[in-house]
Amino acid sequence: MGLTTGQQERFDRWYRFYPVKKGKGQALKAWEKIDPDDALTERMIAAIENQKRERAWKETIRDRFIAPWKYPATWLSAMCWEDECDPGPQREVIATEPEPDFKYINGKLYRRRGSVRANQGGAGGTEGSGPQERT
């Protein structure tokens, strides 16, 4: 049957974002079956970008298995744009580090070593200051 011009344009746009360039013919068949409109195509692209970010932060965690990317046809057939992404450590970092020059460890506030703000006022040098009780 073949894709219409609009379907082909949407597929090409989506395919540019997908990180695995294998099995394009099978991906085209899956795309034709789904026949996404512009809105769904944009949702799919947003999902790919979210999944890329999720994988990027997971790669920073030592000894964590990260499954390889699915082939494009498999990703489409499995409706992987509907998958939920793990937001990563952002929430934890925001909650535990109110300012970039300070860090809470076990309820105690530490100034970052070499911090310009920590060294203003004379005390502290480049060693930073020791723990302070959290208020």
Image (cartoon, helix red, strand yellow):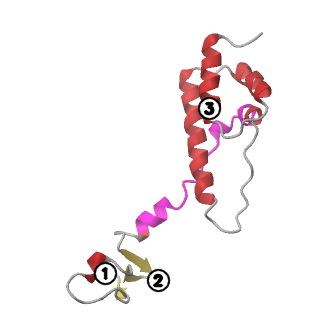
List the residue tagged with mark 3: 16
Name the N-terminal-most of marks 2 and 3.
3
Q: Secondary structure at mark 2?
A: loop
Which residue is at 55% across, 58% downward? 88
For the record, the magenta segment spans 75-95
Which residue is at 37% across, 90% downward? 130
* Residue 82 image-quadrant placement: top right
Placement of 86 over or under 4, stated as above or below: below
Query: How many residues crowd around disc 2 within 10 Å: few (fewer than 14), some, or many (20 or more)?
Result: few
**Mark 2 vs mark 1, CA separation in Å:** 13 Å
Which residue is at 71% across, 32% downward? 76
Which residue is at 40% across, 70% downward? 97
List the residue tagged with mark 2: 106
In the rendered image, residue 110, in percent from the top left (x then y), is placed at 38, 82
List the residue tagged with mark 1: 135
Placement of 35 over or under 87, stated as above or below: above
Q: Which quadrant of the rendered structure holds the N terminus? A: top right
Was residue 84 drawn as part of the magenta stretch in this picture? yes
23 to the left or right of 131:
right
Q: Secondary structure at mark 3?
A: helix
Q: Amino acid at mark 2?
A: Asn
